[in-house]
């Protein structure tokens, strides 16, 4: 029984209950994700960078650092676009879709085989009669949550 409890507590160093495996890493850094999309939404770069930092900080036992991190996340926002999704009988849009794509470079200084560069994208559908400004906060929150979780899963959950 003692041996079982020992393994339960000390195995959390390599695997935690949120699904992330940090290996030997102790620190992580999230460099500023510049907005290089054709349509620039002011403040979105700062908000996404902070959102990703918070997610990793909350789901792992790693310490956030601004340089020399064991795990490094960097990249840029490459797309921010709105497009009509479905039409009405009068040939007008019934629904619009906001899409955000982010290119991510992940560097794992403790295990270089896990490094990758990958594009993550997600969307948010909203009624055509709604203005983007009225749904933007909820839309970006939903998109950032999904993209950040996808980045976390690709880099630490090995999914």
Image: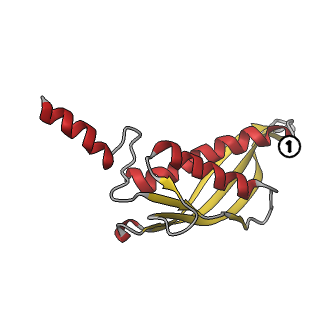
Q: Nearer the viewer, residue 93 or 105?
A: 105
Relative image position of residue 47 (x, y in whole percent): 71, 51
Disc 1, SS: helix
On the image, the x and y values in percent for residue 68 come to 50, 69
Q: Residue at x 65, y 66 (%)?
A: 76
Q: Which of the 4 quarters of the picture holds residue 75?
A: bottom right
Number of residues whose C-alpha sits closer than 10 Å to that of mark 1, classed few (under 14), some (14–19) or many (20 or more): few
Residue sitting at x 45%, y 52%: 62
User: Viewed as shown, does residue 147 lie left or right of 106?
Assistant: right
In this view, the residue in front, 3 or 71, is 3
Q: How many marks?
A: 1
Whether residue 88 is situated above or below residue 122 in the rendered picture: above
Residue 91 showing in the rendered view: no
- Which image quarter holds the N terminus? top left
What residue sits 83% from the left and 39% below the top?
A: 128
For residue 153, say whether it is visible. Answer: yes
- How has the structure been colored for display? secondary structure
Q: Is residue 149 left or right of residue 102?
A: left
Q: Position of residue 91 (x, y in %)?
A: 84, 42
Observer-nearest residue: 11 or 86? 11
Residue drawn at (68%, 42%) of the image? 141
Q: Is residue 149 above or below residue 45?
A: above
Q: Quadrant of residue 119?
A: bottom right
Q: Is residue 43 above or below residue 91?
A: below
Q: Position of residue 55 (x, y in %)?
A: 55, 46
Q: Which residue is mark 1?
A: 133
């Amino acid at each position: 029984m003692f041996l079982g409890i020992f393994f339960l507590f000390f195995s959390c160093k390599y695997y935690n209950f949120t699904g992330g495996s940090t290996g030997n890493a102790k620190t992580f850094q999230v460099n500023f994700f510049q907005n290089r999309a054709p349509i620039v939404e002011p403040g979105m770069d700062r908000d996404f960078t902070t959102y990703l930092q918070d997610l990793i900080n909350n789901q792992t036992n790693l310490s956030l650092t601004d340089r020399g991190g064991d795990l490094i996340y960097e990249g840029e926002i490459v797309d921010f676009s709105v497009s009509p999704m479905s039409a009405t009988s009068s040939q007008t849009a019934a629904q619009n879709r906001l899409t955000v794509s982010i290119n991510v470079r992940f560097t794992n200084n403790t295990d270089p085989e896990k490094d990758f560069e990958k594009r993550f994208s997600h969307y948010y559908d909203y009624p055509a009669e709604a203005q983007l400004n009225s749904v933007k906060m909820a839309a970006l929150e939903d998109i950032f949550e999904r993209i950040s979780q996808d980045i976390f899963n690709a880099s630490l959950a090995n999914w």
